[in-house]
Image (cartoon, helix red, strand yellow):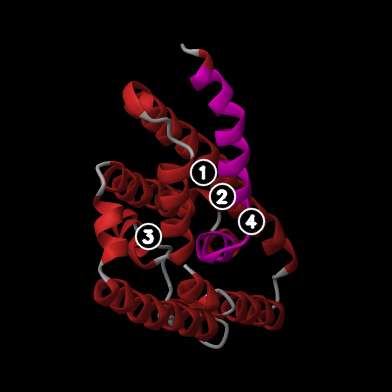
Amino acid sequence: MSAELLTLIPALILFCFAAAFTPGPNNILLTYSGANFGVKRSLNHVIGIRVGMTAIHIIMLFGLGSLFLALPVLHSTLQVVASLYIVYLAIKIARTSTLKKQDSLLAEPMSIKQAALFQIVNPKSLTMIISVCSALTLPGDLYWHSAIMGLIIFNIVGICCALFWVTTGKYISKYLQSPQSLKRFNLIMAVLLLGCLPLIFIA
């Protein structure tokens, strides 16, 4: 492995950790899922996030990210869709706190497909991937070596961070045994998710 690639590794790890660990739509939803459904039932959600982000990452590496940024209409449309979907998810989470679980709109954790598709409208995911592809790849002959290394590190760090948030949710669930405490927790998660809306327009 070249010296340039070795030098890039610490920067990739630090960036991926900071990006994947800090609160955002995925981590809020993972914490919610861990608290309401447990770690095992939330694993498909974790896998789906990685599937979706990996697919977008590969597309960006082939240069389609530049095309996306060059089309303002496409960007604006995605912002509107993302806003509406995040509001929709927040309502689902809030309603989980007021309905019996079996009647809830969000009575099951996200499937692999649902979590993967959510990454298309997740502003934080798109921003992270664009940053990794543009700022943390090397030019010339080392481009694909650095790109593949970034993809691998991003997934390893991302999985670890996702499991942390799911486990955190599971731990919190010990204190959510009463309907009132579960209601408060889910409402807080819904409000935090709505708090991510400004990221859409910053991204």
Secondary structure under tag 1 reads: helix
Q: CA distance from mark 4 to mark 1?
A: 11 Å
The residue nearer to you, when weighing 130 against 163, is 130
The magenta stretch is: 4-32
Q: Amino acid at mark 3?
A: Gln
Is residue 12 magenta-colored?
yes
Q: Amino acid at mark 2?
A: Ala
Q: CA distance from mark 1 to mark 2?
A: 6 Å
Give the numbered dot on residue 158. Answer: 1
Q: Which residue carries the number 3 mark?
A: 119
Judge from the rendering whether residue 129 lies leftward or rightward of residue 17; answer left or right.
Answer: left
Q: Quadrant of residue 77?
A: bottom left
Whether residue 79 is situated above or below residue 39 in the rendered picture = below
Secondary structure under tag 4 reads: loop
Whether residue 166 is situated above or below residue 194 in the rendered picture = above
Q: Residue at x 63, y 38 (%)?
A: 14
Q: CA distance from mark 2 to mark 3?
A: 13 Å
Mark 4–mark 3 CB contact (< 8 Å)? no
